[in-house]
């Protein structure tokens, strides 16, 4: 399937958001995910299914001072 992640189209054959995050080694405690315009609860990453055409925005939290 083809999905868009942070403005880049990718081919992805897995089915859940967690699988995508694991593939790209995102730390779930340090990110926020928006799927098709809505925020996905961290508790749902393992069950949130991805479909062809989905649009994801993944934002990393960074500290500053």
Image: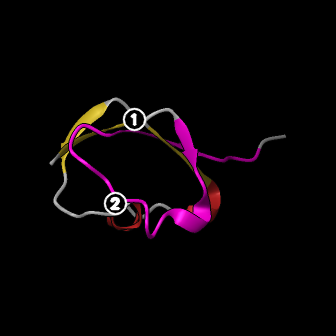
Is 41 contained in the magenta span? Answer: yes
Which residue is identified by label 1? 6
**Identity of the residue drawn at 47% across and 60% down:** 26
Q: How many marks overall?
A: 2
Which is more toward the observer, 12 or 49?
49
Q: CA distance from mark 1 to mark 2?
A: 13 Å
Give the residue at x 43% y 68%. 47
In the image, which residues are magenta? 38-63
Asked if one can make out residue 17 in the rendered structure from this viewpoint, the answer is yes
53 left or right of 20?
Answer: left
Name the residue at 34% across, 60% down.
20
Q: Dot 1, crowdedness within 10 Å: few (<14), some or many (≥20)?
A: few
Q: Which residue, given by chain and number where applicable, does mark 2 sit on?
A: 20
Q: Determine if the magenta segment contains residue 25.
A: no
Outermost top residue: 7
Which type of secondary structure does the marked residue at label 2 adopt?
Answer: helix
- Above/below status of 46 relative to 56: below
Residue 27 seen in this snapshot: no
The local secondary structure at tag 1 comes to: loop
**Is 60 placed left or right of 9 in the picture?**
right
Where is residue 65? Give x, y as percent.
85, 40
Few, some or many residues within 10 Å of mark 2 (<14, 14–19, 20+): some
Residue 57 position within the rendered picture, expressed as x and y whole percent measured from the top left: 46, 38
Which comes before the other along the chain, label 1 or label 2? 1
The answer to whether 36 appears left or right of 4 in the picture is: right
């Amino acid at each position: 399937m083809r999905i868009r992640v942070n403005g880049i189209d990718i081919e992805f054959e897995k089915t859940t958001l967690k699988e995508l995050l694991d593939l790209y080694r995102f730390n779930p405690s340090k990110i926020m995910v928006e799927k098709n315009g809505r925020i996905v609860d961290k508790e749902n990453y393992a069950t949130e299914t991805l479909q062809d055409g989905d649009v994801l925005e993944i934002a990393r939290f960074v500290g500053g001072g």
